[in-house]
Amino acid sequence: MDSIKREYPRKTKKIKAMINIRIDDSTMSALSPGIKDETLKIIAETKDISWGGFCLQLPKLPRDRGKRFTPEKAHTVVGRQIVVSLNNPHLTLWGEVIRFDSNAQEMAIIITKVSDYDLWQELCNAQEVT
C-alpha cells in the first residue's frame, strides 16, 4: 500500500499543552444514568506539528468512568471537539480528534481554528536550533 502524502509536512516539536475535550456521549448517559456529560482536562505535549494539524502525546491518561480511553473504546474519542492551550508560545488551537491510539497514548488533531494564525505559521515554519 502506498503511503499517504500529507498536505502539510509535519515537524517534530515538543510543546507543553493543556487539553480540554468534551466527552458527551448521550448513549452512555442513557445506559448509565450516573454518568453525565463532562469536559476532561489533560496535560500533554505535542509530538509534531503542521499548519493543518498536530499530534499530542498524553503522558498519563485521565480517569474516565465511561472508559472511553481504553483500547476497546478509543474510537469513541474520534470526532470529538478539542481545545488545546499551548504554554510557550501562548496559543490556543481548536480542532477535532481524527485518531486516538490508547496503546501509544497519542492523539492526532486536525485544526479548525487558531487564536493567532501568524504565530502558528511562524512556529510551524521555524527551523530547529541544534
Image (spheres, rainbow, N blue to C red):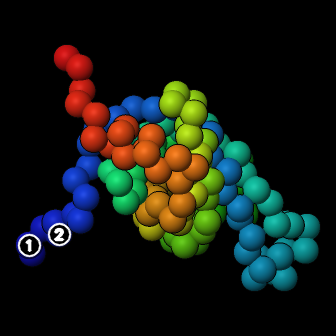
Q: Could you say which is closer to the camera, residue 39 or residue 83?
A: 83
Residue bearing mark 2:
4
Q: Are marks 2 and 1 in contact (CB under 8 Å)?
A: yes
Residue 100 appears in view: no
Q: Could you say which is closer to the camera, residue 47 or residue 113?
A: 113
Query: How far is mark 2 from mark 1, CA to CA?
Result: 6 Å
Residue 120 appears in view: yes
The N terminus sits in image quarter = bottom left
Residue bearing mark 1:
2
Residue 42, image quadrant: top right
User: With respect to residue 17, does 109 lie above or below?
Assistant: below
Q: Is residue 61 left or right of residue 103?
A: right
Residue 85's x, y, as percent? 60, 42
Within 10 Å of disc 2 (Cα), the crowding (few <14, some 14-19, many 20+) is few
Q: Could you say which is closer to the camera, residue 25 or residue 18?
A: 18
Q: Residue at x 47, y 50 (%)?
A: 117
Within 10 Å of disc 1 (Cα), the crowding (few <14, some 14-19, many 20+) is few
Residue 112's x, y, as percent? 51, 65
Q: Secondary structure at mark 2?
A: loop
User: With respect to residue 12, does 65 lie above or below?
Assistant: below
User: With respect to residue 101, does 46 lie above or below?
Assistant: above
Which labelled disc corresponds to residue 82? none
Q: Residue at x 23, y 20 (%)?
A: 129
Q: Is residue 94 left or right of residue 126?
A: right
Q: Residue at x 80, y 60 (%)?
A: 38
